[in-house]
Amino acid sequence: MAPTNKRDYYEVLGLKRGAGADEIKKAFRTLAFKFHPDRNQGDKAAEASFKEVSEAYEVLSDAQKRKLYDLHGHAGLDGQSFRAPEDIFEQFQDLFADFFGGGFGASQRPTQQSRRASQGGGPRAQPGRDLRTSVRIPFRDAVLGAKHEINVAFPMTCPECTGRGTAKGTSPVQCVQCRGRGQVQASSMGFLVMMPCNTCRGRGEVIATPCPTCSGGGEVRGEKKVKVSIPAGIDHGQAIRLQGHGEPGANGGPNGNLLVGVEVEPDPNYQREGYDLAVEVPVPFVTAALGGAIEVLTLDDHRLKVDIPPGTQAGATFRFPNEGVPQVGGGGRGDLLVVARIEVPRRLSDRQKKALRDFERALRDED
């Protein structure tokens, strides 16, 4: 007679009767993640819940056992044998390994990855890591865009062994510790789990005679010239991503990316304010007083005429739309702000001094 204190299997998985196979699988996967002993070291309650979830899944995922259970409840399963929780868990091995960072998931049989390794397939392809470097550019290049060439310290495939890591005339040999499977069994919370082999680091093979140039690593450090297109409008502290220029991938995986941080040199005349540019220009004293016009040479070398009205004061600002910094990726430009700096003569002749005093008296007389 089945124990009467067992919870309903549908209740265990949080499902309604009539749930589909995908719903059952999804519920099991979620709860198995939650209660797996490797995530709850020393937690007996979690261990018991994991076993309960595993048993419920085994019944409800098997059409014959589920039919018996639906008709007769737990009593209908008397005499049925149940697999250990780790055996059920094996069918989700690859998924759980990705979730927990590898080497996780109970199984007494070789995983798919270890079978591939034992059959000569080797470990899964892994993408290369991203590399980071920086480039210092003039202010003008940041505003208008430019091309730069930079030197990047780069891991390169060893020219001696072409990346194999073995000395000429030799080949890797099967790992004795894991017998080529790339994984070994270990005990965790009463379960047998498959862990990456420490001897071969999961490769299933070891290099007996390493390449003298790269010491078996398959790579050497080199320097590579990389051309970088600086987009118009980029700002200090932003980065440019160069696809595929990072470290090479392992086992045929794609290369990583190169992230180039941009450092913009300050300009003695121009200041950036978002996408606007501000430049201070000298305005002669007489022009400020009587009015006139001055010219401003922009960063892209064209001249703008600035009309100065009579009585212009220091700090007066003249705005020129769409003459500022281009927005990265398009979408227009900011404005150019021309700020007046009134030039007062430092040296005056006697005649000039007299003329200014006469001007001052004329102002007082008019008042």
Image: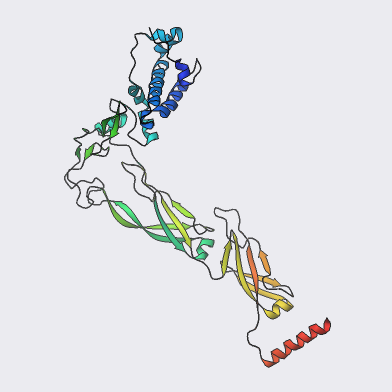
Relative to residue 96, is residue 168 depicted above or below?
A: below
Quarter of the image holding residue 170?
A: top left
Q: Residue at x 44, y 7 (%)?
A: 72
Residue 156 appears left or right of 4? left
111, 16: nearer the viewer: 16
| Badge count | 0
Q: How is the image coloured?
A: rainbow
Quadrant in the picture for the C terminus = bottom right
Question: Picture quarter containing residue 270?
Answer: bottom right
Observer able to see residue 89: yes
Residue furthest out toward the bottom: 350
- Residue 59 placement (x, y as % from top left): 40, 15
- From this viewpoint, is residue 20 visible? no
Q: Is residue 331 above or below residue 355?
A: above
Residue at (73% x, 73% y) in the render: 309
Looking at the picture, tell me which residue is in the foreground, 84 or 245. Answer: 84
Quadrant of the rendering where the N terminus is positioned = top left
Percent position of residue 156, x then y: 30, 52
Residue 108 x, y percent position in the rendering: 28, 25
Question: Measured from the top left, where is residue 234 in percent x and y?
Answer: 52, 57
Closer to the camera in the image, 3 or 86: 3
**Looking at the picture, does residue 339 appear above or below residue 98?**
below
Instruction: Determine whether 58 is above or below 302 in the image.
Output: above
Q: Residue at x 20, y 35 (%)?
A: 177
